[in-house]
Amino acid sequence: MQFADRADAGRVLAEALRPGRWCDPLVLGLARGGVPVAHEVARALGAGLDVAVARKIGAPGHREFGVGAVTADGEPIFDADALRSLGLTPDDLAGTCAAERREARRRLEVYRSGRAVRLSGRDVLVVDDGLATGVTARAALREVRSRAPRRLVLAVPVGAAQALRQLRGEADRVVCPHRRDDFRSVGRFYRRFDQTTDAEVLALLEQHRHD
């Protein structure tokens, strides 16, 4: 099973979400790769579109190996098993955490330009292009939860079955049309999986406002 691209994945995900009844829904694309998926979901549901930003905290010397995640304002979270396996503590990663928090704040400023986004009392759907370990999704969900949404949903087109099970307690509902036990990376489920740029995120947000 492969999606053509993130827009294709978004349309598949939207079909899985369309039967639901939504109260003032807002779709938050997990920047950056989740935004093209979220754009299709928001259009299909007639929902608002904005972004969520969570930054992976990489292991020293192995930045791509995520051992935690942090948002612009929430508390950092860590994968305890990963820390133990590497002999690390959260204090060892304080510098990396601070740098990633600064980057999260920079991206929010770029994407929102100071706009306030109301989450309280709304059905909020956090959308990404896939779920591998779930560490960045967990950080994003916890920050959204702190802002009192009416209902919090995590929605991804494809995800690792174990990570999805672990996130059930973080969201009121988890939606994933394709749950895989043989998950290795998000990119293997896409024929086209180019990196999403800030410019593309901004263009999609602007397009949605004028649709």
Image (cartoon, rainbow, N blue to C red):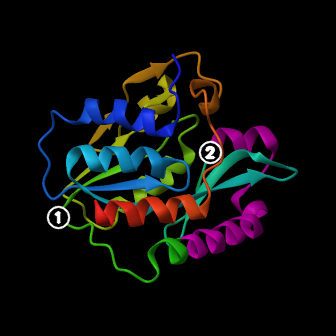
Residue type (three-letter) at the residue carrying disc 2: Asp
Q: Residues within 10 Å of mark 2 (few under 14, many from 20)?
A: some
Front one among 154 and 22: 22
Residue at the limit of the structure toward the bottom, as seen here: 114
Q: Residue 88 vs residue 75: left or right? A: right
Q: Quadrant of residue 104?
A: bottom right
The image shows residue 32 at horizontal and vertical percentages of 55, 55
- 131 w.r.t. 39: above or below: above
Residue 176: quarter of image: top left
Identify residue for label 2: 79
In the rendered structure, does residue 141 fall within the stretch colored magenta?
no
Give the quarter of the figure containing the C terminus. Answer: bottom left
Tell me the crowding category of disc 1: few under 14, some 14 to 19, or many 20 or more residues within 10 angstroms, Cα based: some
Instruction: Tell me the residue at 44%/21% (across/down).
Output: 179
Q: In the rendered structure, which disc, 2 or 1, sits on the residue that comes first in sequence?
A: 2
**Whether residue 15 can be seen here:** yes
Which residue is at a point 58% across and 64% down the rendered structure image?
199
Residue 22 point in image, percent of width and height = 14, 48
Q: Where 14 sits versus 98, above or below? A: above
Residue 88 shown in magenta: yes
| Residues shaded magenta | 80-107
Q: Which residue is mark 1?
A: 121
**Front position in the image: 177 or 141:** 177
Q: Position of residue 206 (x, y in %)?
A: 40, 67
Marks 2/1: CA–CA distance: 30 Å
Residue occupying image coordinates x 42% and y 29% = 165
The amino acid beneath tag 1 is: Gly
* Element at label 2: loop
| Residue 56 percent location from the top left of the image | 64, 54
- SS under mark 1: loop
Which residue does the image show at 62% across and 45% down from the upper left? Answer: 79
Q: What is the count of numbered marks?
A: 2
